[in-house]
Amino acid sequence: MQLAEQTCAACDSSAKPLSDVAIEQLLAELQGWQLEHSSGIKKLAKVFTVKDFSAAVAYAQAIAELANQHDHHPALVVEWGRITVQWWTHSINGLHKNDFVMAAKTDALVQSL
Ligand SMILES: C[C@H](O)[C@H](O)[C@H]1CNC2=NC(N)=NC(=O)C2=N1
């Protein structure tokens, strides 16, 4: 099943972070997402280019609604002409399959905007 169609499962501190091999396999299913390390935490990041600041705010609002629907929330940086989205799982300070599912859902949402 495509990542974008999968469920973002409830996740707590007992959830297991993905292995590096699993991360590489899932990353290959996404387009344009980068693996980042910040403050020792692995994150998935992508920059979406949009037409101006208002468009970036609208994207942020739509992604925020998606996040609330799934109770899984990204970091969003809104700037003129672009929005940066970062997914990771706070409860495990790392990457869970949920983050890849949400990255794929973000791509599907952005394509529909
Ligand atoms: C209580 C609530 O379900 C949790 O705090 C959720 C909220 N959104 C979340 N989002 C992300 N990205 N990681 C989490 O661990 C997380 N936990």
Image: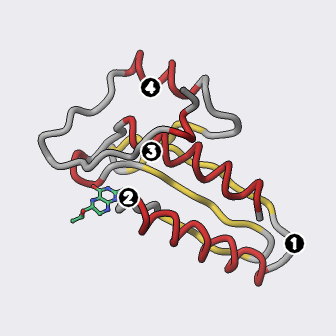
Question: Of the residues shown, which amino acid type is indicated by label 4?
Answer: Ile
Q: Residue at x 44, y 25 (%)?
A: 23
Question: Of the residues shown, which amino acid type is indicated by label 2?
Answer: His
What mark, if any, has residue 23 been given in the picture?
4
Report the residue marked by disc 2: 72
Distance between the alpha carbons at the discs numbered 2 and 1: 27 Å
- Identify the residue at the far left of this view: 14
Q: Mark 1 vs mark 3: which is more N-terminal?
A: 3
Q: Residue at x 24, y 48 (%)?
A: 11
What mark, if any, has residue 51 been given in the picture?
1
Is the residue indicated by label 2 positioned so its CB lies within 8 Å of ligand 1? yes
Q: Nearer the viewer, mark 2 or mark 4?
A: 2
* Quadrant position of residue 70: bottom left
Is the residue indicated by label 4 positioned so its CB lies within 8 Å of ligand 1? no
Position of 78 with respect to 111 (left or right) is: left
Question: Of the residues shown, which amino acid type is indicated by label 1?
Answer: Lys
Q: Secondary structure at mark 3?
A: strand
Report the residue marked by disc 3: 43
Q: If the image is split into quadrants, where does the C terminus sit? A: bottom right
For the residue pair 104 and 2, the one nearer the viewer reads as 2
